[in-house]
Image: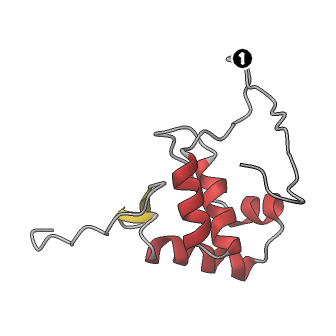
């Protein structure tokens, strides 16, 4: 459907090849939109930073790398991590080990057997 004064955009994306070493983002649009609505600006940037890695990839998070790439402050980097934890996008599985989910989940209840 066309509306008065509506702009038309044509998307021209760089198509990654199998030989590329650069990461590229593949995510369901509905999940990306939901995260954009759910998270504040810097937390959404962190969501994109983490989601740009391939499924199953583990890495040691460097706030400084995130700061350098996205131009946020150290306080914003820290509060963004906390927001992703609070909202269920990052779930701690053991001390300082987190699982990232593109759709938030409830944190598991700690077992009394540990």
Does residue 65 lie above or below 114 as drawn?
Answer: above
Residue under label 1: 19
* Quarter of the rendering occupied by the C terminus: bottom left
User: Who's the residue at 78% across and 66% down the image?
Assistant: 67
Q: Is residue 60 above or below residue 58?
A: below
Picture residue at 52% right of the left edge, 54% below the top: 31
Q: Nearer the viewer, residue 15 or 111?
A: 15
Q: Residue at x 61, y 80 (%)?
A: 79
Is residue 77 depicted above or below 25 in this figure? below
Q: Eyeballing the image, is 80 above or below 19?
A: below
Residue found at x 9% / y 69% = 113
Q: Is 106 displayed left or right of 46 in the figure?
A: left
- What percent of the width, then of the height, locates residue 35? 56, 63
For residue 78, what is the image quadrant?
A: bottom right
Q: Residues within 10 Å of mark 1 (few under 14, many from 20)?
A: few
Horizontally, is 8 left or right of 110 in the view?
right
Q: Nearer the viewer, residue 4 or 35?
A: 4
Where residue 50 appears, x then y in whole percent? 60, 53
């Amino acid at each position: 459907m066309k509306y008065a004064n509506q702009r038309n955009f044509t998307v021209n994306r760089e198509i990654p090849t199998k030989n590329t070493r650069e990461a590229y983002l593949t995510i369901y649009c509905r999940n990306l939109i939901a995260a954009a609505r759910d998270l504040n600006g810097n937390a959404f940037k962190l969501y994109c930073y983490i989601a740009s890695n391939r499924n199953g990839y583990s890495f040691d998070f460097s706030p400084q790398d995130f700061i350098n790439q996205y131009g946020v402050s150290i306080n914003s980097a820290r509060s963004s991590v906390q927001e992703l934890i609070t909202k269920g996008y990052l779930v701690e599985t053991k001390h300082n080990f987190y699982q990232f989910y593109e759709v938030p989940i409830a944190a598991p209840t700690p077992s009394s057997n540990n």
